[in-house]
Amino acid sequence: MTKTVFAAAVATLLAAGAASAQTAPAPAQDHANHAAGHHAAHPTIDSTIEALVADPATKAVLDKHLPGIDRHPAYAQFKGMTLRQVAPFSQGNITDAKIAAIDTDLKAIPAA
């Protein structure tokens, strides 16, 4: 997938997020990206999107700020990236301010 096509796919992330969150079930998630030995800790802003989606508490934060991210048509292409890595391809939809807000909410989640 070229950078331009990927950028266009990610650019629709927020615009299509609410619509894609309607009825489609979330795909099964791979828990391989969870850090070994840190079962009580939640993923952080520096974790991959896939790891954030795999944890129910952090997925709720993503759903608040980026509804339907795990059902986006290009999810398979960007799930192994962090939000900061995807941001440059989002045509301004994933901003530093949005990342900061997500980070604040992630840090507010109590450890299990």
Image (spheres, rainbow, N blue to C red):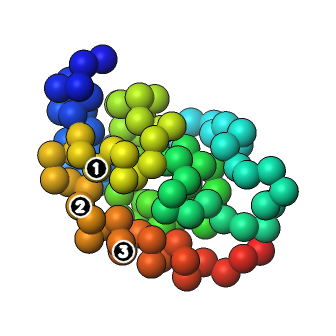
**Image quadrant where residue 63 sits:** bottom left
Residue lying farthest to the top in this orientation? 1
Secondary structure at badge 1 equals helix
Say whether disc 2 or disc 3 marks the residue closer to the N-terminus: 2
Q: Residues within 10 Å of mark 3 (few under 14, many from 20)?
A: some
The kind of residue tagged 1 is: Ala
The kind of residue tagged 2 is: Thr
Is 62 in front, or is 80? 80
Residue 102 location (% of width, % of height): 41, 69
Secondary structure at badge 2 equals loop
Q: Are marks 2 and 3 in contact (CB under 8 Å)?
A: no
Alpha carbon separation for disc pair 1 and 3: 14 Å
- Check the picture and name the quadrant holding the N terminus: top left
- Check the picture and name the quadrant holding the C terminus: bottom right
Q: Which residue is mark 2?
A: 95
Q: Which residue is mark 3?
A: 101
Q: Which residue is mark 1?
A: 87
Alpha carbon separation for disc pair 2 and 1: 7 Å
> Looking at the image, which residue is at 45% across and 41% down?
81
